[in-house]
Image (tube, rainbow, N blue to C red):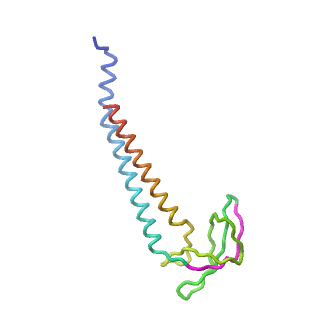
């Protein structure tokens, strides 16, 4: 004989099943859109940038173990003095460093290395893949 409470729970789970599938699908599409936007933004940032030689003219510490580094550099026959917060090892005034700047806005210094940006995108993609795998297993378990 079938227990009536078990039958009611099964019916309720089947009614909620399309809602769970819908929610999982929405989260997947939102994650995919965010991933694509992030990847395209990173691609545009690094393809529209250039490495220039800069002189370090001042280094000061901040509260969260970051350094405020002021650079002096030339780009396209113009001189710039800009600051950037970054986590760098040993750096002192008078050093010459290679920095990455935007071509269309040379006063903006890009402090995130390209390897870090690529690793962030890979990590995002792996998390999205793990979410899809977990969602599929959840749907199989409920259904």
Which residue lies most toward the top here?
A: 1
Q: Position of residue 15 (x, y in %)?
A: 30, 30
Q: Position of residue 40 (x, y in %)?
A: 41, 64
Residue visible at 38% across and 56% down in the picture: 33
Q: Quadrant of residue 84?
A: bottom right
Whether 69 is drawn above or below 127: the answer is: below
Q: Quadrant of the C terminus?
A: top left
Which residue lies most toward the bottom here?
A: 77
Q: Which residues are magenta?
A: 52-62
Whether 59 is drawn above or below 72: the answer is: above
Determine if the magenta segment contains residue 29.
no
Determine if the magenta segment contains residue 58.
yes
In the shown orientation, is residue 91 left or right of residue 23? right
Whether 102 is drawn above or below 115: the answer is: below
Q: Quadrant of residue 19?
A: top left
Q: Position of residue 103 (x, y in %)?
A: 49, 78
Q: Quadrant of the N terminus?
A: top left
Q: Quadrant of residue 54?
A: bottom right
Give the total of numbered labels: 0
Q: Position of residue 141 (x, y in %)?
A: 35, 32
Residue visible at 33% across and 28% down in the picture: 13
Which residue lies most toward the left here?
A: 1
């Amino acid at each position: 004989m079938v227990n009536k409470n078990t039958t009611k729970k099964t019916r309720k789970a089947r009614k909620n099943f399309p809602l769970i599938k819908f929610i999982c699908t929405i989260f997947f599409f939102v994650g995919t859109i965010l991933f694509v936007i992030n990847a395209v933004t990173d691609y545009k940032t690094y393809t529209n940038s250039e490495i220039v030689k800069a002189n370090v003219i001042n280094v000061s510490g901040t509260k969260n173990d970051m350094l405020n580094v002021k650079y002096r550099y030339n780009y396209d026959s113009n001189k710039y003095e800009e600051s950037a917060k970054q986590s760098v090892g040993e750096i002192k005034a008078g050093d010459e460093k290679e920095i990455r700047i935007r071509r269309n806005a040379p006063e903006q210094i890009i402090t995130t290395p390209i390897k870090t940006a690529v690793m962030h995108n890979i990590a995002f993609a792996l998390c999205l893949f793990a979410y899809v795998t977990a969602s599929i297993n959840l749907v199989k378990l409920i259904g």
